[in-house]
Image (spheres, rainbow, N blue to C red):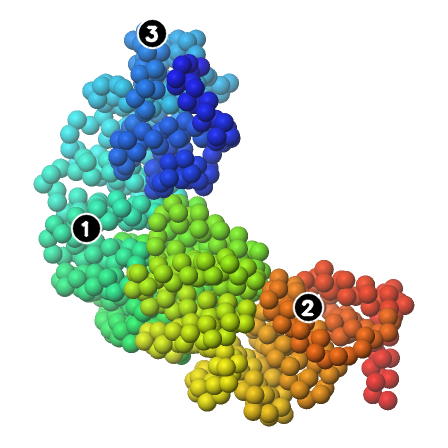
Amino acid sequence: MRLEGAQGGRFAESARRLRLQPLNLASLHEILKTELGRAFARPTLVRIEATSFGNPFFALELARALVEHGEPIQGSAPLPVPSDLAELLAGRLRRLPARARRGLLAASALSTPTLELLDREAIVRAETAGVVTVDEHGGVRFSHPLLAASVYASAPVAERRAVHAELAPRVSSSEERARHLALAAEGPDGEVAAALVETAQAARDRGAPDAAIELLELACELTPAGAREPLDARRLDLGRYLSETGDPQRATHVLRDIADNAPGGGVRARALLLLAFMSETAEAGESAIELCEQGLEATGDDVDLRVEILAAASRMSDFDVERKVAYAHAALDLATGEHVSPELRSYALLAFAEAEFFAGRGIAGDAFRHAAELEGAAATDASRAPRRSLHRVHHYSDVRPSARLLGILRIYADELDEARAEFALEREVASEHGDEVQLARTLIRLGLIELRAGNWSLSGEHLDEAASVLERTRQEALQRWMLATNASLDGARGRVDEARGAGEEALALSVAAGTLWGTAESHAALGFLDLSVGHVSSARGHLDAAQELGERIGPDEPRLLRSDADRIETLLLLGELARAEEALERLELSSSAWAAAMGARCRALLCSARGDFAGAASALDDALRAHERLPLPFELARTLLVQGQVLRRRNERRLARDALDRSVAIFDELGAPLWTEKARAERDRLGLRKGSPHELTPSEETVASLAASGLTNREIAERIFVSPKTVEANLSRAYRKLGISSRAELGALMSERRRSAKA
């Protein structure tokens, strides 16, 4: 079907700007943001994408009409079609006979129209007129992406209802049948509403949240006015589904209405708790706890719900560890009652485990094991109806809360392989279920994992994808977290301007929101950046601010913020040895491998500053032993840099060269130019003459020795934190210098070299 005149000219212009190619939600979001300067909620994007059949300039026209109409629009309502286009299409349709128009209305009302479900003769007439096409399997498709929307929107309401009533018994899907029955109803209908609720839950469980939202909206419309309790329960589920799909504006409207107008009791308390979850995502401040406290007042004698709210309040109290611990203990004490459900006892245990970690007592393995057992018992107890716990707002059957929380704590405990496996699964599940709120969190966590593991390109990919999701879902707290993480990544990669821009934006947003944790993380990222570029006084200001905020928050777990070592190094560079030692003594109280490595490295720097090079060397031995338990190549390279500095000052120049060569190699491999330059500058200060062209460098010597011991290239790479390609290059150079061509020769030769060295 051709468009002519002004409409055709406008669409041609859109085509030139947008490049005609199929859309996905991400590209649609980018186009609408660029062309219209605004973001749309995910459910609206889904409707636009489906209605336009992925055509970018028709999607743009629909979006413009939505802006004029005023978003949001309920899932069951037809999308508005641009008025000039609607007039043009209506003129084309008026030329068809009434039977053909009726057949087209039926086709527009179906999610997947086929000849089997439609009036064949009517569709044939429409196909002859060029309005639809029919494929070899009998599938019917409108020739213009917006014709279906125009046909449906222009039909009288009574005629639409009649068509839906005719289609309901023909379709095979229970979900679509319920939808047609609902759209055929002339008024409230309790039976149809109940069927819609059931099919909405099934749609959500199969990973179709947008369909679930539409069905629940219809269920709410059809619930009789006097049925207040089921209506509130359905609207509560609707608010939850909307929050999951990243439509906070509509979710808040629905839930706030329940919280303000529902009588005191479970539904009102649950609405307040859901609002608290959303507030934490958006603001990460005390407002979430205030909503939890209001929810506690509304719980009445529902012990399960009281446990749930107390545990949730603990999970949300990251900004106040003392309060976090108090809520967790209150929840756990109450959860010991015999009538409390297993899944709520599990949730209370998880709140307790998280609070214990924040209090510096490590991962509570027994609590996690017990929580997992309770989750398993709840999942397999067929005699008990499943409880709709709001703490599972982002939880599906294949991702258990205990596994998620354990994965989170493993990031901070540097158990990165286990954490990566957990959140790779979480990413898959969140994507399958359309849960963009959880997807954004998961992508940031994956970005943080790969940042610490030294896989910085992959970290950047995860964070870029998170940024795209956050533009659609408008989660301010996650936006601040993503920016602070990006600042740390860009700082490590030497992208100074980008790091400073992201860090300062994260800081400004965090200060404006009043979030202590976000402000502390932003200061820590900017302090590390200034330390990296040598702006020591500025680094000290940021790192002192992070330290002060950390003390206000109160975590006794230094791995959560991780600015201690940078601050101690900065104080030492400024000659403030007493303050550095005070900070170091606090760091050394922690028993974790990370604190042991960082504390020993800082102890070496302090000893070196006092001229105690023997003490510094001993501390570095301790640091390197601790590093053997840590998958943190960047921090290892920093420790090797300090070792090289200390060995140089002890006049052990060849050993210093070895340490600095390893440091340079790791920094180079990671792509950390600012720190590579520091290590190379330190190595240049050694003043050693270059060896003969046949002498192995320290890096080649290390790789050759490990290869001679029987390790594979990949095992060597993992041992010394370089890539297999770097190992291969070092081995090739070693073979050439030694005049050999096999590992067997290498093993014999390295054994001979060791015997000669001992002789």
The label on residue 349 is none
Secondary structure under badge 3? loop
| Residue displayed at 43% across by 19% down | 9
Give the structural element (helix, strand or loop) at label 2: helix
- Image point 60% across, 93% down: which residue? 612
Distance Cα–Cα, label 2 vs label 3: 75 Å
Q: At which x and y percent is residue 170?
A: 33, 23
Q: What is the CA distance from the residue labelled 1 to the residue labelled 3? A: 49 Å
Q: Can you identify the residue that label 3 sits on?
A: 95
Few, some or many residues within 10 Å of mark 2 (<14, 14–19, 20+) = many
Above or below 58: residue 32: below
Q: Nearer the viewer, residue 134 or 552?
A: 552
Q: Please indicate, yes or no, whether residue 114 appears anywhere in the rendered image.
A: no
Residue at disc 1, secondary structure: helix
Q: Identify residue for label 2.
A: 665
Q: Quadrant of residue 311?
A: bottom left
Q: What residue is at 51 percent from the left and 58 percent from the top?
A: 497
Q: Is residue 11 above or below residue 72?
A: above
Which one is nearer the viewer's eye here, 393 or 318?
Answer: 318
- Give the Cα separation between the discs numbered 2 and 1: 57 Å
Precedes in sequence: disc 2 or disc 3: 3
Q: Which residue is mark 1?
A: 256
Q: Amino acid at mark 2?
A: Ala
Identity of the amino acid at label 1? Arg
Marks 2, 3: nearer the viewer: 2
